[in-house]
Image (cartoon, helix red, strand yellow):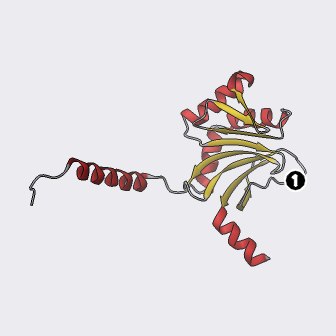
Amino acid sequence: MNKHISPVLLCIVALLLSLFFSSCRQKSQPNIDEIYREFQENQRDFQQIANYFSSVKYESIFIDSDDEFFWADFHQYPFDEMDVEVYNAINYLFKEKGYLGISKSNIQLGVEFRMWTDNRSIDCGVIYAVRNDKEPHPEFVVELVPLPEEGWYYYVSDYNKWRSQQTQAG
């Protein structure tokens, strides 16, 4: 039997250990108090982005923290087509605060700020109602709680839990 460990085997073990420890370091889902505290610290940026997204002509907008562009009504646009102050606020939330995505959907009646995900089926964050007369409804929402600031809500979306609730209700 060879007494030397194969470099390939060593790399595989190192990769598996790396994956294990990175999954252990993932933050747990923040509760409403943690989300609200974060919201209060960055409320000016949230409001600026929400106002801009609410006023633009697009039915839907999506920005992922990893992209150098944004999607609007199924078309890709460079950030230089966006208001520079709004771009700076978005960039701050992504780069400095670790936010994952921002989207607007007239169907969901809101501007959504995704603050956390489990990378499988659960997301949470805050959402701004684009219409004063209706609550927003993020996709697969299982929890929607009004925040003290008018028009703002804490939300949790969980596809598996939502699907189970839909099955039980129907």
- Along the line of sight, which residue is nearer the eye, 51 or 62? 62
Tell which residue pokes out farthest to the right in this image: 133
Q: Amino acid at mark 1?
A: Lys
How many numbered circles does the render carry? 1
Query: Relative to 137, does residue 58 appear above or below in the rendering?
Result: above
Q: Say which quadrant the N terminus sits in.
A: bottom left
Q: Indicate the position of residue 137 as horizontal and vertical percent values.
A: 78, 55
Query: Relative to 49, does residue 37 appear above or below in the rendering?
Result: below
- Along the line of sight, which residue is nearer the eye, 135 or 42? 135
Q: Which residue is mark 1?
A: 134
Secondary element at tag 1: loop
Query: Relative to 130, does residue 170 appear above or below in the rendering?
Result: below
Residue appearing at x 60%, y 31% in the figure: 92
Query: Relative to 141, does residue 34 appear above or below in the rendering?
Result: above
Q: Is residue 55 left or right of residue 65?
A: right
Q: Indicate the position of residue 81 as horizontal and vertical percent values.
A: 74, 23
Q: Say which quadrant the C terminus sits in.
A: bottom right
Residue appearing at x 73%, y 59% in the figure: 144
Q: Indicate the position of residue 6 as horizontal and vertical percent values.
A: 19, 51
Neighbour tally class for label 1: few under 14, some 14-19, many 20 plus, Cα within 10 Å: few
- Along the line of sight, which residue is nearer the eye, 159 or 85? 159
Residue appearing at x 61%, y 54% in the figure: 33
Residue appearing at x 23%, y 50% in the figure: 10
Tell which residue pokes out farthest to the front in this image: 1
Q: Indicate the position of residue 89 as horizontal and vertical percent values.
A: 66, 30
